[in-house]
Image (cartoon, grey):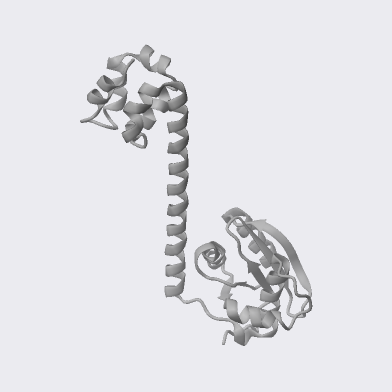
């Protein structure tokens, strides 16, 4: 059981990938904060600092410590807040004790905060191993997002090149995500600019990114 005797404000976070709903309650059960906020480090730091300055010791509670819940926990720990999580199944059972049936982010955030205040025995501590796993899962999630974004950008480039210069697209297609090709397209955004640059200048530009491929790539490009 987590000792909540010295807690001055209980902050429940219904976490989301892009936004969280945050509800803070005092030991007397009075709401001290109840708003949505972006799930970003600056906004989280701003909220935690505001609650610490006004109330004192803050306990940050989430309903999932991994994945999207990892960032609020990491920021809270860094700022000296106490942290805990309320297991999802436990939360759903506790929710039956509260009025209203509609599931909303605001209702869930309040239930998390109020359960931490009134039923501290339902909370689970987050040890260093849990936090490490959560941070790794968060990093893995970011990697997945970046990979998806890279694929979308590559597909967009394929489409644009096909429309503007099909022969150039055929040459670049297998290497479209190579740093040398991206540098070429960034520096010379059209086939006319590539032709104007000339072979020597293009090879000089690409050689640092592709020492063995630069000359061959330029020869394959029809300009």
Q: Residue at x 66, y 71 (%)?
A: 12
Going by the image, does 76 lie left or right of 197? right
Q: Residue at x 42, y 14 (%)?
A: 192
Q: Residue at x 71, y 82 (%)?
A: 96
Which quadrant is the N terminus positioned in? Answer: bottom right
Placement of 199 over or under 179, stated as above or below = above
Q: Residue at x 61, y 64 (%)?
A: 15
Taking depth in this image into account, of 125 and 58 the one nearest to the observer is 125
Which quadrant is the C terminus positioned in? Answer: top left
Q: Position of residue 165 (x, y in %)?
A: 42, 21
Placement of 122 over or under 65, stated as above or below = below
Q: Position of residue 147 (x, y in %)?
A: 42, 48
Residue 54 visible in the displayed image: no
Going by the image, does 69 lie left or right of 218? right
Q: How many marks?
A: 0
Taking depth in this image into account, of 31 and 3 the one nearest to the observer is 31
Please tell me in which quadrant of the rendered image residue 38 appears: bottom right
């Amino acid at each position: 059981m987590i000792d909540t005797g010295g807690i001055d404000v209980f902050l429940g976070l219904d976490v989301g990938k892009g936004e969280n709903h945050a509800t803070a309650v005092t030991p007397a059960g009075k709401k001290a904060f109840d708003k949505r906020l972006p799930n970003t480090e600056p906004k989280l730091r701003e909220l935690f600092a505001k609650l610490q300055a006004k109330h004192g010791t803050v306990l940050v509670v989430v309903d999932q410590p991994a994945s999207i819940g990892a960032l609020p926990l990491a920021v809270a720990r860094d700022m000296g807040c106490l942290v805990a999580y309320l297991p999802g199944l436990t939360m759903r059972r506790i929710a039956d004790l509260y009025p209203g049936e509609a599931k909303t982010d605001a209702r869930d955030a309040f239930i998390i905060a109020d359960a931490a205040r009134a039923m501290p025995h339902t909370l689970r501590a987050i040890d260093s191993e849990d936090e490490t796993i959560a941070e790794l899962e968060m990093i893995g999630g970011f990697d997945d997002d970046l990979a998806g974004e890279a694929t979308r950008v590559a597909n967009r480039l394929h489409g644009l090149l096909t429309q503007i210069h099909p022969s150039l697209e055929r040459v670049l297609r297998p290497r479209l995500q190579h740093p040398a090709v991206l540098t070429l397209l960034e520096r010379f955004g059209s086939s006319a600019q590539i032709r104007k640059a000339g072979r020597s200048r293009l090879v000089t530009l690409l050689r640092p990114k592709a020492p063995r491929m630069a000359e061959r790539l330029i020869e394959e490009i029809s300009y």
